[in-house]
């Protein structure tokens, strides 16, 4: 007689549940590592984007012997909406095709013009966006830059005087007297950019180009004044007045509580430099180099970095 072949034994329900539990534990252990690796890659790309902006600024200065600036009608006769610093850096950011479609003489705001049938301020220039930012577009569909200038870097007017309406400390370490650096008088601007149509030359940076901020990260989602988009010519002046990563995002502010110290609408606090990265933000110095500066940096050192001419020795940063 032929011996019957034994049927293979399957998994029991308990064994199957044990395997699923083990896999779930492994996924839970691996997921944070994967997320950290992804964020490290995004942070590296963010730094590279900032480096491209720094190089573009250097090349612009080589061409015109002055840094690019915002071109605003309010502070330069005839300069009706001729675009932000970032508009004028486009040819040096491998974006000449976009730049050449813009009209700077017809009185139409550059941000509201169209290129390839698309409104300019809704065009995504990837080098102007930090890939870690979860809110790169505002409620009007405008693409926000994650980097701005230093009026002391979003553009940096430096550590300039702000409106005396409470909030962050006003008037400390200041060598620029104009509120928000809204002036064409360079003696009233401590950083390398004014809010409008003035920017420094290399010779104006007496503190040294490696010790002075030019651009830094911002979160437009957390600021009313920085949410106008990368092409807007009347906004975009970030300040060192506020500590790095000062909380001013919508989730940090309760209107009913009147907490103006964290309001995205309070110019004293909203315009500071901040990033979605943990622990600090990327900054571009006037020599084109990029540094990640800790949010715990000494406040006096931070103010000295935002000022182009105060003559102070910059500490470690």
Image: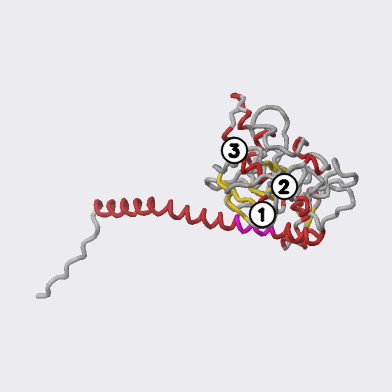
**Residue 48 sits inside the magenta stretch:** yes
The percent coordinates of residue 310 (x first, y second) are 71, 43
Give the residue pinned by disc 3: 246
Quick one: label 3 or label 1, which is nearer the N terminus? 1
Name the residue: 81% across, 47% down. 198
**Residue 289 sits inside the magenta stretch:** no
Which secondary structure lies at badge 1? helix
Residue stretch rendered in magenta on the structure? 46-54
Looking at the image, residue 213 sits to the left or right of residue 194; the answer is left
Q: Quadrant of the N terminus?
A: bottom left
The percent coordinates of residue 52 (x first, y second) are 67, 59
* Image quadrant assignment for residue 258: top right
Viewer-nearest residue: 63 or 171: 171
Give the residue pinned by disc 1: 210
Q: CA distance from mark 2 to mark 3?
A: 23 Å
Give the residue pinned by disc 2: 308
* Image quadrant assignment for residue 175: top right
Mark 1 surroundings: few (<14), some (14-19) or many (≥20) residues within 10 A:
some
The percent coordinates of residue 215 (x first, y second) are 68, 50
The total of numbered circles placed on residues is: 3
């Amino acid at each position: 007689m032929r011996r019957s072949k034994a049927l293979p034994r399957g998994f029991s329900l308990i064994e199957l549940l044990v395997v699923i539990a083990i896999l779930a534990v492994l996924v839970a252990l691996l997921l944070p590592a994967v997320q950290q690796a992804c964020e490290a890659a995004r942070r590296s790309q963010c730094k590279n984007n900032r480096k491209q902006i720094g190089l573009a600024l250097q090349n612009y200065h080589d061409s015109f012997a002055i840094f690019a600036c915002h071109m605003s009608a309010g502070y330069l006769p005839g300069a009706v909406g001729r675009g932000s610093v970032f508009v004028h850096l486009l040819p040096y950011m491998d974006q000449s095709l976009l730049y050449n479609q813009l009209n700077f003489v017809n009185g139409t705001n550059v941000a509201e013009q169209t290129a390839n049938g698309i409104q300019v301020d809704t065009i995504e220039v990837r080098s102007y966006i930090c890939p870690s930012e979860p809110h790169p577009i505002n409620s009007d569909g405008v693409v926000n830059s994650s980097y701005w200038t230093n009026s002391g870097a979003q553009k940096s007017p430096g550590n300039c005087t702000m409106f005396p309406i409470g909030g962050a400390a006003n008037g400390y370490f200041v060598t620029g007297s104009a509120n928000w650096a809204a002036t064409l008088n360079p003696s009233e601007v401590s950083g390398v950019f004014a809010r409008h149509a003035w920017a420094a030359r290399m010779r104006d940076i007496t503190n040294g180009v490696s010790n002075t901020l030019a651009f830094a990260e911002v979160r437009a989602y957390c600021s009313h004044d920085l949410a106008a988009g990368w092409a807007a010519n009347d906004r975009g002046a970030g300040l060192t007045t506020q500590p790095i990563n000062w909380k001013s995002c919508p989730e940090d502010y309760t209107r009913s509580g009147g907490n103006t110290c964290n309001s995205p609408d309070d110019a004293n606090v909203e315009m500071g430099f901040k990033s979605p990265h943990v622990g600090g933000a990327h900054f571009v110095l006037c020599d084109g180099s990029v540094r990640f500066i800790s949010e715990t940096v000494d406040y006096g050192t931070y103010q000295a970095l935002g000022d182009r001419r105060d003559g102070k020795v910059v500490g470690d940063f």
